[in-house]
Amino acid sequence: MQRTGNAPATALTVSPADRVKALRAYELLGTDLRQPAHGGTIEIDSNIPVAKGHASSTADILATALLCVAEAYPDTPEPVAHALALSVARRLEYGDYLLHPGVAACAQRSQTLLATYETDLRWTIVGVDEGGFVRTEEFHREVPEDAGKARVYEQLFAELDAALRADDGAAAARIATHSAELHNDRLPKKSLEDLQGLKEEFGALGICVAHSGTLAGLIFSRHDGEHDERVAQCRRALDDLGYTGSTYTLKEAKRP
């Protein structure tokens, strides 16, 4: 993330040009900090797929907001810079908490941090992208909340919180599986049945999905001595079923 050029004050732009929320974040926070935009181009260089469930727009917004703080007040302490970035991010969209170096729980609609975790799960996700796009806020507007399921999710979150605090990867994966299956009537994953079969065949810990995205995957752990073989076999099986698989690793804040 960088800003280049010396264009007139009214000509601040962003590249790629469709990252309008990121540009708006810079403009809003600059006004809040009494440091209005003074031209140039904000260049966003990101490899995060857009509208897939990877929190791409939130990442763009937070990075741009942090750039604005750094330019206006370079010596701002990190916690203050993070608070300022979040103050503008939550005005623009639903989002995830991306400022913790590991796993975090967040109230998506308000971008309120609920908890951070130090873990050593060593998860690998063998994932598939089912195609298409999901715009988070549009999805939540179009698919009303189910009060009965909300109570179930509240209980699942309590169980997941306990599992992550205990660094219990197997329990966390089982909870992720339950959540994925419970959510499938709201945003169906056509791969879910295949993933359920592969989970049993290759001993995956569980299934995870992007609840407002196009991604689904199988959870493995590098604590397992057969991890590499299981992952390779799973990738081949997905290819045989006609899916294009990708492998992701979990970014973690290590336990002391």
Image: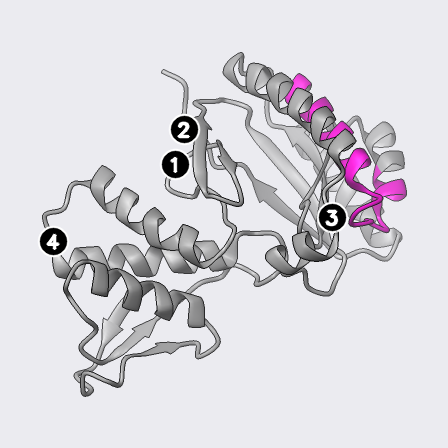
Q: Answer whether labels 1 and 2 touch (C-beta < 8 Å).
A: yes
Gap in Å between the C-alphas at discs 1 and 4? 21 Å
**Of helix, strand and loop, which mostly describes the magenta segment?**
helix
Residue 124, compared with residue 132, is above or below; it is above
Q: Give the residue type at disc 2.
A: Ala
Q: Give the residue type at disc 3.
A: Pro
Q: Give the residue type at disc 4.
A: Pro
**Left or right of 27 in this view: 168:** right
Q: What residue does disc 4 label?
A: 74
Task: Judge the density around disc 1: few (<14), some (14-19), many (≥20) Cα neighbours within 10 Å.
Answer: few
Residue drawn at x 11%, y 53% is: 74
Q: Which mark is residue 253?
A: 2
Residue segment shown in magenta: 171-195
**Front position among marks 2 and 3:** 3
Q: Position of residue 126 (x, y in %)?
A: 69, 42
Mark positioned earlier in the residue sequence (1 or 4): 4
**Front position among marks 4 and 3:** 3
Q: Give the residue type at disc 1.
A: Pro
Q: Position of residue 54 (x, y in %)?
A: 56, 52
Residue drawn at x 22%, y 64% is: 30
Q: Which mark is residue 144?
A: 3
**Left or right of 202 in this view: 46:** left
